[in-house]
Amino acid sequence: MKIMMMLMTMMVMLMMMMMMMMMTTTTTTTMMMVIMIVNVNYDNDDDDDDDDDDDDDDDDDDDDDDDGDDDDDNYDVNDDYEVNDNYEGCPKRNRKRGITETALRA
């Protein structure tokens, strides 16, 4: 079964390479070809999960210092700005004209 999978991946790689060579070989298609070949070669079916470094006993997922100050927890962006309630928008005579309006006036 493993030999069949290797033969199939080799056939797929050859077909992809031929298709890419028929196209115009620009930098993008060459990089796509390299990425596809690397992705096919990185398909390891080994069932040994040695690289699984998850420590299940580590419960410190939340980044609380437990020092009492909750600065970043309830941060409100609007606290940094003064809101002017009397603002009525920019008067029309002070408004800058856009490109289309300038083009229409010319």
Image (cartoon, rainbow, N blue to C red):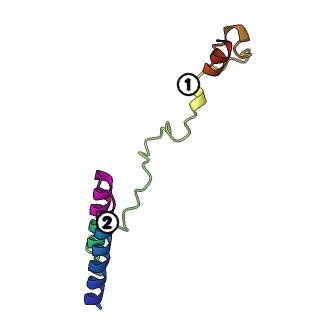
Question: Callout 1: helix, strand or loop?
Answer: helix
Q: Position of residue 85 (x, y in %)?
A: 72, 18
Q: Which mark is residue 36?
A: 2
Q: Residue 29: say if magenta.
A: yes
Residue 91 lies in what quarter of the image? top right
Question: Callout 2: helix, strand or loop?
Answer: helix
Most foreground residue, 67 or 39: 39
Q: Which residues are magenta?
A: 21-35
- In the picture, which quadrant includes the N terminus? bottom left
- Identified at 37% across, 67% down, the residue is 57
Q: Circle 1 sits on which residue?
A: 80
Among numbered discs 2 and 1, the one appearing first in the sequence: 2
In the figure, 50 relative to 93: above or below? Answer: below
Q: Position of residue 30 (x, y in %)?
A: 28, 58
Query: In the shown orientation, is residue 36 left or right of residue 85?
Result: left
Q: Mark 2 against mark 1, which lies toward the viewer? A: 2
Indicate the amino acid at tag 1: Asp
Label 2–label 1 contact, CB within 8 A? no
Most foreground residue, 89 or 11: 11
- Label 2 and label 1: CA atoms lie apart by 49 Å
Q: Position of residue 17 (x, y in %)?
A: 28, 68
- Identified at 59% across, 22% down, the residue is 81
